[in-house]
Image (cartoon, grey):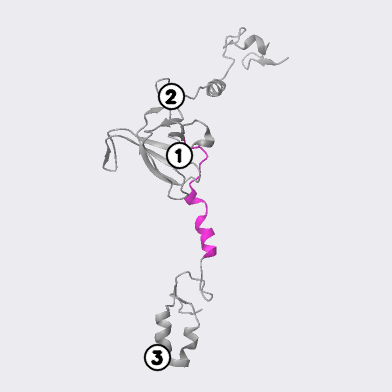
Amino acid sequence: MAKVICESCGSSFPLERVTNMESCPVCGEALWGEEDSVNESSANEVLSFGEDIELGENDSFDEDKIDFWWYSIREPGEVWEGITFESGKVSTNCAKCGHFVGSAPYPIARTRDYLLIDPRFTDKCSHCGNELKNHILSKRPADWVDPRKCDMWEKDYANLPKCPICSSTKIHKISMTNKAASAIAFGVFAAGHVSKTYKCDICGAKF
C-alpha cells in the first residue's frame, strides 16, 4: 500500500487517506511542498482562453501544431529605445527552426504559457518558410538555444574556398574579361594567368 510520510515528524499515512489532506494531523505541518502543488495544478490545467473566445479551425494548443513561439510582450504605450508601442506587440520565433520571425499583434487573450493573436494576421519565417496558421502562440521553451550561436560560422567556414598558400578566405574570382585582356596583351605568356580561377587578395597567389 502506498504511503505518504510527513517530512516534519516522520508520521506515515496511507495515500488514500491523505488525498484531500493538506497538513499532517499529528504535527500540523504541510504534507505537500509548493513544488508539488505547482506541478499538480499545471497537470490539471485546462488549456482554454474562456468560453467567450472563439478559436479558428487551425488554432490548437497541441505543441506539435504550434507555428510560432513568443518570448516577450510590449505592452500598449510602452517605450523601448525611443519607440512607443501604441497597440502593443509580441516578439516571436519560428517553432520549426528557432529563428527570429519578428513582431505579431498584441494578444486577444492569454493564459500563463499561451497567447491568442488576431486571426487575420499572417506571417512566414524567412529562414525555413514556415507559415503562421495556428494563431495560438506557445511560450518559447526555457531550453531554447539561439541558432545563430550554434557554431554556424565554423560549419560554413569549412566549406568556403580558401587560398592554398595562406588559407585566407579573402579571394576573388578572376573574370573572363580580365583573362581575355591578359591573353591579348601578353599572348602565350599569359597562360599562367588565364588557366587560374581565383586570386588571393592577401598574398596575391593565383589558383
Label 3 sits on residue: 185
Label 3 with label 2: CB-CB less than 8 Å = no
Given the image, on which type of amino acid does mark 2 rest? Phe
Residue 76, percent from left and from top:
29, 33
Q: What residue is drawn where x is 40% and y is 82%?
A: 178
- Most extreme residue toward the right is 1
Considering the numbered disc 1 on the image, is that residue within a helix, a strand or a loop?
A: strand
Number of other residues with Cα within 10 Å of mark 3, as a class: few under 14, some 14 to 19, many 20 or more: few
Number of other residues with Cα within 10 Å of mark 1, as a class: few under 14, some 14 to 19, many 20 or more: many
Given the image, on which type of amino acid does mark 3 rest? Ala
Lateral position of residue 116 relative to residue 26, left or right: left
Residue 185, percent from left and from top:
39, 91
Which is nearer the eye, 88 or 3? 88
Residue 195, percent from left and from top:
50, 83
Mark 2 vs mark 1: which is more N-terminal? 2
Considering the numbered disc 3 on the image, is that residue within a helix, a strand or a loop?
A: helix
Lateral position of residue 182 relative to residue 165, left or right: left
Based on the picture, tell me whether residue 46 belongs to the magenta stretch.
no
Mark 3 vs mark 2: which is more N-terminal? 2
Specify the quadrant of the image occupied by residue 108: top left
Residue 49, label in figure = 2
Work out how far the residue at label 3 is from the one at label 2, CA to CA, in angstroms: 77 Å
Label 1 sits on residue: 68
Work out how far the residue at label 2 is from the one at label 1, CA to CA, in angstroms: 18 Å
Q: What residue is drawn where x is 38% and y is 34%?
A: 119
Q: Which residues are magenta?
A: 139-159
Number of other residues with Cα within 10 Å of mark 2, as a class: few under 14, some 14 to 19, many 20 or more: some
Mark 3 vs mark 1: which is more N-terminal? 1
